[in-house]
């Protein structure tokens, strides 16, 4: 079995460190307007800390199904499935030992021009309660001087199964150790959210964000309406407004006004979970940093939460012979 390590991709402008444990982004150095580099993702210094520590899903790929499944139950092709319950009454992020807590094989690592690394994982029938064998690959690459791309694919071998992967990086464009992100500006190309019940399961309705504290259709500071969102943001947006480019929709823009660093996220996924690190509370991170509440923000492009039990949502079921494809581009600039 492959051993957990950290690999590096660099193109002279951006420097990325990723581990084959959980396909985790552990570090990402990005320049500001003056060329000063900062590590803009929360995380730990060593792989061991991810393996042994209590990590709030820092930088990893979550699956087989990201986000929550109501009561950890679903029925597919006439069979009832029960998943591990690990978040209130629900199953979260693929279960107790999801894709974020396994060692992936390194299928390919290119260090030359347009560096890339491909991780591969074989998920077994019955693993964490899910049906059928599935082959999953995740390729991180630096296709241009200012962008990071992630292409995820998954192919079920023998049974239909729900598949919805997400990348769970916590961003802080001022630097991972710079305090909270309440002054970051965020824009999300979604006119609706999927409102949730008291256990964070969508009710099945879509709610227009206009006139609510969830409206990020124009650039807003994260903290501007925080008092009206008890606990902070942890909501799935329906990506219905972004222009398309090369098959991807524009999903979100984040700007740190101090460093002027800007991140634009493009994806082919139908939704994005906007999460403001509400449960991160005194986590000892890289270089002695202590991550307090709201010290980062996540924009996890994904299928809608609990889609497997919600016929009104876009289906996340993938059948043998079909292929799940989820691509995202993280584009950095200064403004
Ligand atoms: C699946 O669960 C439902 C209710 O939760 C039940 O009515 C049904 O009989 C179950 N089916 C099987 C095949 O066990
Ligand atoms: C959520 O609400 C339901 C009914 O509306 C209630 O039965 C349940 O105890 C509540 N759960 C939590 C975690 O508050």
Image: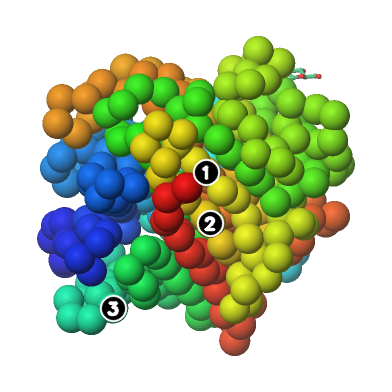
265 vs 108: above or below: above
Q: Residue at x 27, y 59 (%)?
A: 14
- Left or right of 19: which side holds 202? right
Tell me residue 9's x, y (percent). 21, 66
Q: Is mark 1 within 8 Å of ligand 2?
A: no
Residue 254: image tag = 1
Secondary structure under badge 3? loop
Quarter of the view holding residue 7: bottom left
The local crowd at label 2, few if under 14, some if 14 to 19, many if 20 or more residues have their Cα within 10 Å, is many
Residue 137 horizontal side relative to residue 39, left or right:
right
Tell me which corner region of the image, top left, top right, bottom left or bottom right, holds residue 49: top left
**How does the figure colour the protein chain or chains?**
rainbow
Q: Quadrant of ligand 2?
A: top right
Find residue 114 and name its label.
Answer: 3
**In the image, the residue with mark 3 has its CB under 8 Å from the nearest atom of ligand 2:** no
| Residue 307 shown left or right of residue 119 in the figure | right
- Mark 2 highlights which residue? 265
Earlier in the chain: of badge 2 and badge 1, it is 1
Query: For numbered disc 1, what is the local secondary structure?
Result: strand
Asked whether residue 20 is in view, the answer is: no
Residue 42 place in picture, x, y as percent: 32, 37
Distance between the alpha carbons at the discs numbered 2 and 1? 9 Å
The residue lying at 52 percent from left, 43 percent from top is 254
Distance, label 1 to label 3, CA atoms, is 25 Å
Q: Earlier in the sequence, mark 3 or mark 2?
A: 3
For the point 14% across and 42% down, which residue is it?
46
Q: Secondary structure at mark 2?
A: strand
């Amino acid at each position: 079995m492959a051993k957990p390590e950290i690999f590096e991709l660099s193109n002279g402008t951006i420097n990325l460190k990723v581990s084959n444990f959980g396909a985790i982004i552990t570090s990402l150095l990005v320049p500001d307007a003056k060329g000063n580099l900062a590590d803009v993702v929360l995380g730990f210094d060593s792989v061991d800390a991810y393996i042994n520590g209590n990590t709030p899903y820092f930088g990893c790929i979550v699956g087989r199904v990201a986000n929550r499944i109501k009561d950890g139950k679903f029925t597919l092709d006439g069979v009832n499935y029960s998943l591990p319950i690990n978040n209130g009454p629900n199953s979260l992020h693929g279960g107790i030992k999801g894709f974020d807590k396994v060692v992936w094989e390194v299928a390919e690592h290119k260090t030359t021009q347009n560096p890339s690394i491909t991780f591969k994982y074989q998920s077994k029938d019955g693993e964490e309660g899910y049906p059928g064998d599935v082959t999953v690959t995740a390729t991180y690459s630096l296709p241009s001087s200012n962008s990071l791309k992630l292409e995820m694919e998954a192919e079920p071998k023998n049974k239909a199964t729900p598949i919805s992967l997400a990348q769970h990086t916590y961003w802080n464009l001022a630097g991972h150790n710079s305090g909270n992100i309440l002054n970051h500006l965020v824009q999300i190309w979604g006119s609706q959210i999927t409102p949730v019940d008291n256990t964070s399961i969508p009710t099945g309705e879509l709610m227009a964000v206009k006139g609510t504290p969830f409206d990020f259709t124009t650039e807003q500071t994260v903290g501007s309406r925080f008092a009206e969102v008890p606990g902070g943001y942890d909501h799935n947006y329906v990506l219905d407004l972004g222009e398309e480019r090369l098959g991807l929709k524009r999903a979100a823009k984040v700007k740190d006004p101090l460093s002027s660093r800007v991140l634009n996220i493009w994806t082919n996924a139908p939704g994005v979970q906007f999460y403001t690190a509400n449960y991160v509370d005194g986590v000892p991170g890289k270089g002695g940093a202590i991550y307090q509440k709201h010290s980062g923000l996540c924009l996890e492009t994904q299928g809608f939460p609990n889609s497997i039990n919600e016929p009104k949502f876009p289906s996340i079921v993938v059948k043998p012979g079909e292929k799940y494809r989820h691509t995202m581009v993280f584009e950095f600039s200064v403004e």
